[in-house]
Image: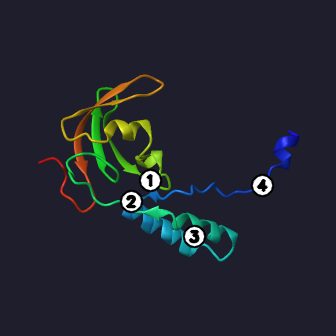
């Protein structure tokens, strides 16, 4: 299509002008990626993105799931599954890292061990019981 040909071609992802949360581990990985990139436009882009990242403070109640939490849930269809709630620069579904704004993370946020989270999905809602909530460097919310 002619309209598409007229658009500038770029491999760069759009950068949000807003600050973006990232876990401490995610920030370390991202900065290592920036430092490994040779000088040039790609590194400049990564540096622009890095300037907007911040690590949110730990939660007031670490027994409840929130940003940075690793949550293990169980449902009758899939058994036990573990997910970590992360920022958009860390999402890796195959590794269980889900974006904080995703329907799954929204369903888990605020839940604690023993609670039932209802994951609203296009394929149908899925109820999951929370088995554990843990944050890096904190005891799990299992006590």
Q: How crowded is mark 4: few (under 14 residues within 10 Å), some or many (20 or more)?
A: few
What's the CA distance linking mark 3 and mark 1? 17 Å
Q: Indicate the position of residue 48 as horizontal and vertical percent values.
A: 58, 67
What's the CA distance linking mark 2 and mark 4? 31 Å
What's the CA distance linking mark 2 and mark 3? 17 Å
Disc 1, disc 2: CB below 8 Å? Answer: yes
Quadrant assignment, res 16 = bottom right
Q: Which residue is drawn at 21% across and 34% down?
A: 115
Residue at label 4?
Answer: 9
Residue 117, placed above or below residue 32:
above
**Which of the two labelled residues, at mark 3 and mark 1, occupies the earlier sequence position?**
3
Disc 2, disc 4: CB below 8 Å? Answer: no
| Residue closest to the eye, 78 or 41 | 41
Q: Which residue is drawn at 88% across and 41% down?
A: 2
Q: Which residue is drawn at 47% across and 24% down?
A: 123
Report the disc number at residue 87: 1
Residue 78, placed above or below residue 18:
above
Q: Indicate the position of residue 101 as horizontal and vertical percent values.
A: 44, 43
What's the CA distance linking mark 4 and mark 1? 26 Å
Residue at label 2?
Answer: 23
Residue at label 3?
Answer: 47
Q: Regarding mark 4 in the picture, which secondary structure is present there?
A: loop
**Which of the two labelled residues, at mark 4 and mark 1, occupies the earlier sequence position?**
4
Q: Which residue is drawn at 66% across and 67% down?
A: 42
Q: Regarding mark 1 in the picture, which secondary structure is present there?
A: loop
């Amino acid at each position: 299509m002619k309209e598409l040909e007229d658009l500038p071609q770029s491999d760069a992802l759009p950068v949000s002008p807003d600050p973006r949360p990232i876990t401490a581990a995610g920030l370390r990985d991202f900065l290592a990626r920036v430092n490994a990139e040779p000088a040039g436009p790609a590194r400049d882009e990564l540096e622009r993105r890095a300037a907007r990242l911040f690590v949110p403070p730990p939660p007031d109640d670490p027994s409840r799931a929130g940003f940075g939490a690793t949550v293990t849930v169980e449902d009758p269809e899939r058994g036990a599954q573990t997910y970590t709630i992360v920022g958009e620069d860390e999402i890796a579904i195959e590794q269980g890292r889900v974006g904080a704004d995703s329907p799954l993370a929204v369903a888990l946020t605020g839940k604690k061990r023993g609670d039932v989270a209802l994951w609203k999905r296009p394929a149908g809602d899925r109820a999951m019981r929370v088995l554990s909530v843990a944050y890096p460097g904190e005891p799990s919310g299992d006590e």
